[in-house]
Amino acid sequence: MKIVSTVTLGAVLLACSVAGSAQSTGPAYKAADLLSPCQTADNDSRWGAAAETECEQYILGYVHALAKVGASGPGKEVCPPAVNTADEVRWAFMRWVHGAYTARGAMTAPDALMETLKASFPCK
């Protein structure tokens, strides 16, 4: 019996989300929901480190899953930064969502992250 790794399973679920074919029975994790710990990381001296970990681990999971399913990298639409990825994408995400908060904050977090990557880290 083959055991499917968590990373592979996460990549498959992400691919479904990116393709728009995943259906959820619960409330979607919105861009505003992810923005909260991303901002708290810089604004809260007591809980900032935990919030930064929550934010950056979500972002890294998303970026690594894109790479795993072949949806990012040379020849693709997005090329996330190879150095300081979590922090670079976190700051780009915060700027992008705040650029049109009402509309972008209501997007799902995966959709908002993909749009952030397209806007801030296109492959050249």
Image (tube, rainbow, N blue to C red):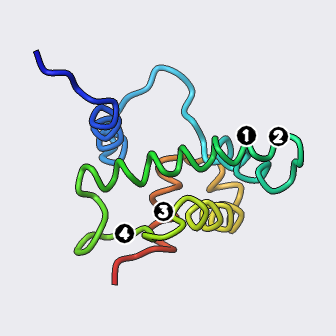
Q: Which residue is farthest right?
A: 45
**Disc assigned to residue 50:** 1
What residue does disc 2 label?
A: 47
Dot 2 amino acid type = Trp
Where on the picture, by quarter, is residue 81?
A: bottom left
Crowding at mark 4 (Cα within 10 Å: few <14, some 14-19, many 20+): many
Relative to residue 88, is residue 66 depicted above or below? Answer: above
Spatial separation of the CA atoms under disc 2 and disc 1:
6 Å
Marks 2,1: beta carbons within 8 A: yes
**Disc assigned to residue 78:** 4
Q: Looking at the image, is mark 2 or mark 4 earlier in the sequence?
A: 2
Query: Where is residue 26 shown, x and y percent of the image?
Result: 52, 21
Q: Looking at the image, is mark 3 or mark 4 earlier in the sequence?
A: 4
**Disc assigned to residue 115:** 3
Spatial separation of the CA atoms under disc 3 and disc 1:
25 Å
Of circles 3 and 2, the one toward us is 2
Dot 4 amino acid type = Val
Q: Looking at the image, is mark 3 or mark 1 earlier in the sequence?
A: 1
Spatial separation of the CA atoms under disc 1 and disc 4:
28 Å
